[in-house]
Image (spheres, rainbow, N blue to C red):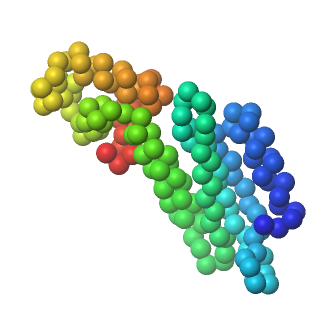
Amino acid sequence: MHPDDFHLAIVAQRHFLHGGNMFTGCCRVRFKKAKRWKWFYGIAYPLLLEEQSNRHLLICLFMEIHHRMHTPHQLRCLFKDMLQYSHRSLLGRLIDREREVLQLLVQGAEIKHIAHQLKISFFTVEEHIKHIKRKLGVRKLSTLIALGKDMGL
């Protein structure tokens, strides 16, 4: 990384320590034995690994900026990939039955149909939904379904 751009790491760290949820910026990088610096656009996004210990994994994605690229399209793809990875990591918080319920919700099934299909009570399905929303940090059912679709369920 170019010496003039090292300050970005400190700025990003401060941003995350004060509760920021995403950091973006541009920096110059020169690979070994290369003579020219190349510009990169970067995104850093913290993922919560363990809620009890408040441990995070910081994912950083960089994309080279050059004259032949269609930047808006590539940035959309980059964001989409990053969000899918982020959302997929949330699935690990759910037990198998909760994943099944979420998948059926995303497919458009009503609660009574989910109960019938999984051979559990209506109230058990509602409890699963309540636990899923709590684990994924979602309040509304519509937001939960949208999140499930973003996960690719």
Q: Quadrant of residue 149?
A: top left
> Where is residue 19 drawn, in percent x and y?
69, 33
Identify the image quadrant of residue 43. Answer: bottom right
Q: Residue furthest top?
A: 123
Rendered residue at 25%/36% (across/down): 100
> Does residue 60 sit above or below 91 in this rendering?
below
Residue 102 screen position, x and y as percent: 30, 34
Q: Quarter of the image for the N terminus: give it.
A: bottom right
Q: How many marks?
A: 0
52 vs 128, nearest the viewer: 52
Give me the residue at 75% from left, 40% from top.
15
Q: Is residue 62 visible?
A: yes
Q: Residue at x 39, y 40 (%)?
A: 91
The structure residue drawn at horizontal position 27% and vertical position 39%, both measured from the top left corner, is: 103
Measured from the top left, where is residue 122 in percent x and y? 19, 18
Q: Residue furthest front?
A: 53
Task: Determine the image quadrant of residue 94.
Answer: top left
Residue 12 falls left or right of residue 137: right
Where does residue 77 sit, x and y in percent of width and height? 50, 60
Instruction: Say which quadrant the C terminus sits in.
Output: top left
